[in-house]
Structure formats: C-alpha cells, structure tokens
Amino acid sequence: MGDLLNCPQCGKLFIKGIRKTCDACFKEEEQQYDKVYRFIRKSENRNATIVDVSEATTVSENKIIYFIHQGRIRVKGFPNFTYPCDGCQKPINDGRLCQVCKEKLKSELSIEDFIMKKQQEALPSYHTDDN
C-alpha cells in the first residue's frame, strides 16, 4: 500500500501510488495537456508563441514548459514557440539547453573526467608477487 501524502498542488491527502498528485489534480493536468495538444496540432496555430498558446488555452506558460520537459509536447517544428534554456534562459525550442550551454556542459564534463583520470594515475599502485 502507498504512503499517505498531501498533494503538492492542492494540499489534499491522497495515497501515493504511481502518481505524484491526487486524482483531481491529475485529471485537471490531463485536461490542460489535452487543451494545449489540441491547440498546437491545428495547422493555423503553427506560428503560435508560448504566450499565444497560454492565452488561448488558459494553461500557464510554466505548465506548458512542464509538458515539454516531460516530452509530451514537442515544439521543434514551431518557429515562434520558444521557452527558456535551463542554463542561461535564452529562448530555445528543443530540449532543455541551448547549444552554447550544451557545449559548456560537455566541456566541464570532459575537464572533470580528465581530472579524475589524472588523480587515479597519481595514486600509488601496489603489486603483489604471486610466487
């Protein structure tokens, strides 16, 4: 049996199972998702911005970004539909990071790997003779 928790959205008690919110909040979120999805699927809305979508559907920009980050809504082919990069807040329309932040992250990871490798090389190694 799941744990008894307060819903992070509305505060009501619910039994945590698969979902992280109560049934009422889950259903409301699914309705919001459906509104956004149906709006952006229409060809006449292909040039909409995130503000346009939010105003037309009454779903907050943050919730729309949440759906994008979940991978439930894809906006790569929508030229005016941008949201902030998680790293620098620059407008993007694919993934979570702009190209500059991706390159910076790769560089930092490469440096970290290099440092770890050098640290391991500097450790004394002990050999035992098996005679």
Image (cartoon, grey):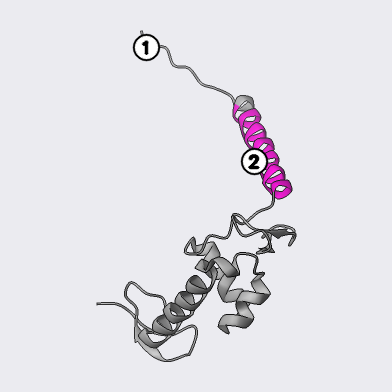
Question: Which residue is farthest front?
Answer: 44
Q: Which residues are magenta?
A: 99-120
Q: Residue at x 67, y 69 (%)?
A: 49
Q: Which mark is residue 130?
A: 1
Observer-nearest residue: 125 or 46? 46
Question: Which residue is farthest left?
Answer: 1
Query: Where in the figure is residue 18, as x and y percent of width and height?
Result: 33, 72
Disc 1 marks a residue whose amino acid type is: Asp
Residue picked out by circle 2: 109
Count of all numbered marks drawn on residues in the image = 2
Mark 1 vs mark 2, CA separation in Å: 39 Å
Q: Residue at x 48, y 73 (%)?
A: 38
Disc 2 marks a residue whose amino acid type is: Leu
Q: Given this view, does label 1 or label 2 mark the residue nearer the observer?
A: 2
Quarter of the image with the C terminus in it: top left
Answer few, some or many: residues within 10 Å of disc 1's Cα (few below 14, many 20 plus, some between 14 and 19): few
Query: Where in the figure is residue 84, as x and y percent of width and height?
Result: 69, 63
Question: Which residue is farthest top?
Answer: 131
Horizontal side of 15 relative to 42 (left or right) equals left
**Element carrying mark 1:** loop
Observer-nearest residue: 84 or 49? 49
Question: Is 116 a magenta residue?
Answer: yes
Observer-nearest residue: 64 or 122? 64
